Amino acid sequence: MIDARAIVSAEAELAANVSIGPFSIVGARVRIGPRTVVGPHVVINGPTTIGADNRFFQFASIGDAPQDKKYQGEPTRLQIGDRNVFRESCTVNRGTTHDKGVTLVGSDNLFMAYAHVAHDCVVGNNTVFANCAALGGHVEIGDWVILGGLTAVHQFTKIGAHAFLAGGAIVTRDVPPYVMVAGNPAAPHAVNSEGLKRRGFTEEQIRNIRDAYRIVYRSDLKLAEALARLAPQADGRPEIRAFVDFIHASTRSLAR
């Protein structure tokens, strides 16, 4: 299922039912899993490992060298899971030796046109990157995060699971799970309650998350004081535990 006009390296490993469209290029040390469809005019360079049932639209550039002046051609990797969609002109770069040496993309993600994932990023599962959403290097994106169009995330920033970044948000600090942010610089506005309902959170869990949000963002408490008040609420409530643990692990300070 390789178009005669495509160029596939003899050192690439493709599952038997992979489809490669016309004028696409698959380089050496690229492994592509079953039922993945690579459309026309796509470039995939290695070392890159791609799972099953992914789809790449035209002009996507996947697994090329990181855009980092310190990079000197060291052997780094890109690893992509299953059932991801990369729309037109998406770019995803390999890692650098200044981190773990690998960029990681999970499964069931949608990357709309012109989305960019820089070197050493970690993207979870079930995320949506709207058009032109871009990550700097070393960014971590949790599961079920939605990035609005033209969103930009500063390098080394962490975004917690189920967060929502409004279109055009400029995110320079960590965003805890469940939180909606907007603006430049991005500031918290509310809990992503509608998204939580769609993903099966109960009314009680959403109420607990809203209470935790108010303690951190609306009580005028210092962060340490807010965390101390939240500590007993986290016991037996995994939705609050995830919120508290993320804040404790934050390294860039919180969007607040």
Image: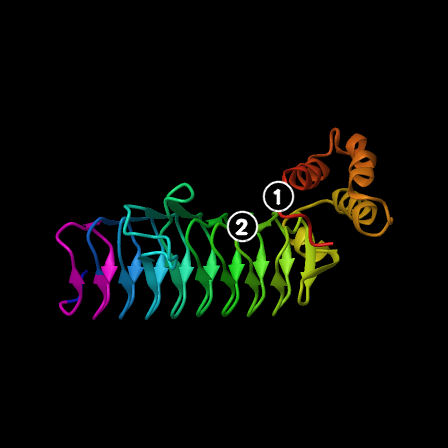
Q: Residue furthest front?
A: 70
Q: Residue at x 23, y 53 (%)?
A: 17
- 191 to 242, vertically: above or below: below
- Is any atom of residue 15 visible in this view? no
Residues in magenta, as a range: 4-25
- 202 to 84, vertically: above or below: above
- Is any atom of residue 121 visible in this view? yes
Q: Which picture quadrant has residue 92?
A: bottom left
Give residue 232's position: percent from left, percent from top: 80, 30
Mark toward the start of the polypeptide (2 vs 1): 2
Labels 2 and 1 touching (C-beta < 8 A): yes
Q: How many marks?
A: 2
Mark carried by residue 51: none
Query: Which residue is under mark 1?
Result: 251
Q: Residue at x 33, y 47 (%)?
A: 77
Q: Secondary structure at mark 1?
A: loop
- Give the class, few, some or many, for how many residues have Cα within 10 Å of label 2's Cα (few <14, many ≥20): some
Q: Residue at x 37, y 53 (%)?
A: 70
